[in-house]
Amino acid sequence: MPIFITQGRYTRDAVKGMIVKPEDRADAVGRIMSKAGGKLIAYYLTFGEYDGLTIAEAPSETQMAAALLAAASGGG
């Protein structure tokens, strides 16, 4: 399966929500990847221009795009 590396930023509202109700975002990302037929390999929080980096396997670019859109639709 192809491996994809993605970077992302949280919105200000997402950060506020995570402060009020902390949760393990790696678990949430892993569940989204599983639903798209893939697997989360690693999830990192980063400093700088991006807030996070993921390394994941997915059957194709289409499934990876579907997972990214599903994650983004949550507003985070």
Image: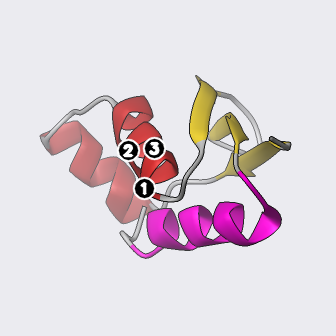
Which of discs 1 and 3 lies nearer the camera? The answer is 1
The relative height of residue 71 versus residue 28 in the rendered view (above or below) is below
Residue marked by disc 1: 35
Check contact, mark 2 vs mark 1: CB within 8 A. yes
The relative height of residue 71 versus residue 17 in the rendered view (above or below) is below
Q: For numbered disc 3, what is the local secondary structure?
A: helix
Amino acid beneath label 1: Lys
Residue under the point 76% across and 47% down: 6
Q: For numbered disc 2, what is the local secondary structure?
A: helix
Q: Which residues are magenta?
A: 59-73
Amino acid beneath label 3: Val
Q: Is residue 60 magenta?
A: yes
Image location (x, y in percent) of residue 64: 68, 60
Question: Which of the image's four quarters has the N terminus?
Answer: top right
Residue marked by disc 3: 29
Image location (x, y in percent) of residue 66: 59, 71
Residue under the point 39% across and 71% down: 75
Q: Quadrant of residue 30?
A: top left
Image location (x, y in percent) of residue 62: 73, 72
- How packed mark 3 is, by other alpha carbons closer than 10 Å (few <14, some 14-19, many 20 or more), is many
From the viewer's side, name the closer residue of 46 and 43: 43
Q: Answer left or right for 69 relative to 6.
A: left
Residue marked by disc 2: 31
Check contact, mark 2 vs mark 3: CB within 8 A. yes
Q: Answer left or right for 26 relative to 18.
A: right
User: Which of the numbered marks, if any, corresponds to residue 9?
Assistant: none
- How packed mark 2 is, by other alpha carbons closer than 10 Å (few <14, some 14-19, many 20 or more), is some
Amino acid beneath label 2: Arg
Q: Is residue 72 magenta?
A: yes
